[in-house]
Image: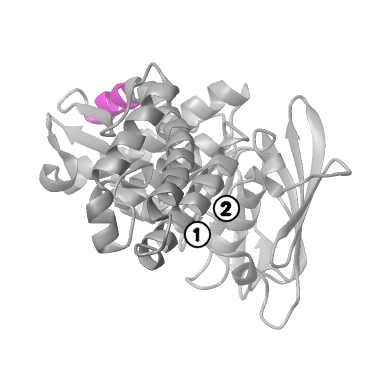
Amino acid sequence: MIARKLQTSHYRNLVPGETEFSEGVNVISGRNGQGKTNLLEAICLFTGVRSFRGAKNPELIARGEKFARLELDFFAEKREQSASLVITDKKQAVLNGVKLAAATGFIGRFCAVVFSPDNMSLVKGGSAERRRFLDAAISQQFPTYPRLLVEYNRILAQRNAFLKKSASAAGFESMLEIWDENLSKTGAKISCKRNEYVSRLCGKTEEIFDGISSGRDCINLRYSCGFLNPDSADETAAELKKQLEAHRASDLAQGCTNYGPHRDDLVISVNDMAARAFASQGQKRSCVLALKLAEASLLEQSAGERPIAVLDDVMSELDGMRQDYLLNHMDGWQVFISCCDPHTVKGLDKGRIIEVEGGQFRIQG
C-alpha cells in the first residue's frame, strides 16, 4: 500500500496544509521539536489503532483549537482510496465517503509498521511494554481485537473497584463470582489470541535474527501465561477462573486483580538466556529489529500487500550493519524515515526529502 497525500488542519503543531509523498523513501528531516514525529503519527492514525506515542485524543489537537482534521489519499486493495479523521474527544472516521462506526474500521484497510526508539523497551522494559507490542500488532490484523481489550479493561476496572470498596458488603461473594466469570471469558480470548500470534511470530523472528547476527546468536520467544490451554479457549477460561478464586485473598488485601492477561509476558531469550538481563546492547537492538521486521512480514501476509514502514528517529539507535540490514528488508516498500540529518543515513539517494521547520513542510526532492 502507498500513502499518496496527507492534509492536516489544527493537528498538534503542524501548519494546516497538504504534503505529497514519494512511493519509495520519504526522509522527514529537521531539528528536534519541529514536527517530524507529528507527521508520522498523523499518517499512522489511519491504521485504526491508537497513536504509537500513546497520546490521547485531546493531545492531538493544536493548542486553542476545538478539533483536528486529517485527510489521507492512499492506494490499497488495487485501487485509489481516501480517508478522513475528525478528532475531538473522540474520532469520527470516513472511508471512501462512508462514515464508519469508529476509527477501528480502518484496521486492515491501511496498515503500517512503526520503528521508534521506544521499541527498545520491548527488551529493556517491563512486561507491560511487551503486552502493548503484541496488542498493537494483533489489532492491525483483527478488527474485533481492540474491542476485546476495551471490554476486558472495563471489567478489570470494575472488579478492582469492587475489591476496594465492597469486601464487607452483603452478597460480596456472589457479586465477585459474576466479575470473575466475565473476566475469565474475555481474558481467555485475549491470551489465546496473543499465544497464537506469538507462535506465528517466533519462526519469522528467529529467521531474521539469525540473518542479523550472521548465525552467531539465536533468539527464542515464548508467551508466558500461567492458565493457558492453547487448544481451548473454554478450558483457558475455566483455568483462569480457578486462579482468580485461588488468589482472591491476596486480591482483597491489595485491592486489585493480580492474575489474568494483564499480568502475562512475552519472554525473549538470546542464546537460552533472558535477553533483558543478559543480552548485550547490540543483541538487544537485534532483538527489537527482528521483532519489528517479523511483525511487518506477518502483517504483509495478513493484508495481502506490504504495509508502509515508519522509522521514527530509529537509525541513530542502530549501527551501520543493522541500518543496512533494515533498509535492505525495506527495499520495495514505501518508507518514512525521520532524522535530524538525512545524509547520516546510508542508502537514501533515492526518494524524497521533506524538510520540517516550525510545523511547516518543504519538499526538497
Q: Give the range drawn in magenta.
A: 205-213
**Image location of residue 364, percent across then percent down:** 65, 58
Q: Distance between the residues labelled 2 and 1?
A: 7 Å
| Residue found 31% across the figure and 52% down from its top | 121
The residue pinned by badge 2 equals 50
Number of other residues with Cα within 10 Å of mark 2, as a class: few under 14, some 14 to 19, many 20 or more = some
Residue identifier under label 1: 54
- Residue 30 vertical placement versus 248 (above, below): below
Residue 210 painted magenta:
yes
Badge 1, how many Cα within 10 Å: few under 14, some, many 20+? few
Q: What residue type is labelled 1?
A: Gly
Question: Is residue 53 in sight in this rendering?
Answer: yes
At 34% across and 45% down in the image, what residue appears? 130
In the rendered image, the residue lying farthest to the front is 170
Please say whether residue 233 is one of the residues in the magenta stretch.
Answer: no
Q: In which quarter of the image is residue 88?
A: bottom right
Residue 230 picture location, percent across and down: 36, 20
- The correct choice, above or below, for 181 with respect to 364 in the image is above
- Does residue 347 show up? no
Whether pointer 2 and pointer 1 mark residues with C-beta atoms closer than 8 Å, the reply is yes
